[in-house]
Amino acid sequence: MSQTSVFINSLSVLLFLYAAWTDFHTWKIPNTIVLALVTLYALRAVAVMLGSEDVGAALFASSGIGGDVGAGLLMFMLGVVLWMFRLFGAGDAKLFLPIGLFVGWHGMLPFSFLLLVLGIVTLLVLRLPVPLRVAHLAFFMRIEEIRASRKIPYGVIMVFATLITMALPMIRQQLQLR
């Protein structure tokens, strides 16, 4: 992976974390974050094409740009359907596009599994009482607001599943080196 791709992935991690932070605090994911993530992916795609010996494979392989775009569009359509049935907010639906772009076609299964596991863990954690010693802290006060409103900021769960999925190839590589 080129230095440019690593830099772009690092910026995307920061933007994904900011999306999770804003969703946690306001139940909203700004369009500017989604557009910035899509732009970063486009820059990464250009860097991959310029650094590739076989541009056709980089564009049309399922592990290349074509697979990433296919995953992004499929996940975006899923997000729109979930939004239409009022299961997701519009920000969550829009966030599925850059998530699909960055996890790619081959990352959709691990992402889906992680999303399921993290969603279940979140629902279970929200049922636990907050210890009185920390109930006055802003984070736990926000947890109480979320619990009382019964509105879950799904963007947070989606972002953490994305970040773990993006890290899986690096983890696999480190395990193979040992």
Image (cartoon, rainbow, N blue to C red):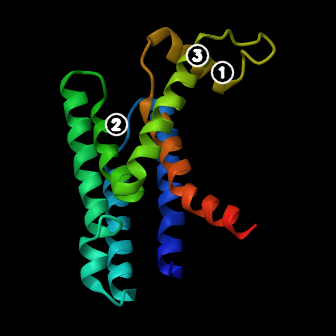
According to the image, label 3 marks what residue? 124
Q: Residues within 10 Å of mark 1 (few under 14, many from 20)?
A: some
Question: Residue 91 at what x, y percent from top left?
Answer: 32, 38
Of the two numbered discs 1 and 2 on the same chain, state the one appearing first in sequence. Answer: 2
**Element class at badge 3:** helix
Q: Residue at x 31, y 56 (%)?
A: 35
Q: Find the residue positioned furthest to the right.
A: 133
Q: Does residue 171 appear in the picture of this structure?
A: yes
Q: Which mark is residue 92?
A: 2
According to the image, label 1 marks what residue? 140
* Front one among 40 and 73: 73
Question: Residue 176 at what x, y percent from top left?
Answer: 67, 66
Q: Callout 1, which amino acid?
A: Phe
How far is mark 1 from mark 2, CA to CA?
Answer: 23 Å
Of the two numbered discs 2 and 3 on the same chain, state the one appearing first in sequence. Answer: 2
Q: Which mark is residue 175?
A: none
* Front one among 112 and 158: 112
Q: Are marks 1 and 2 in contact (CB under 8 Å)?
A: no
Q: Is residue 169 left or right of residue 134?
A: left
Q: Callout 2, which amino acid?
A: Asp
How far is mark 3 from mark 1, CA to CA?
Answer: 15 Å
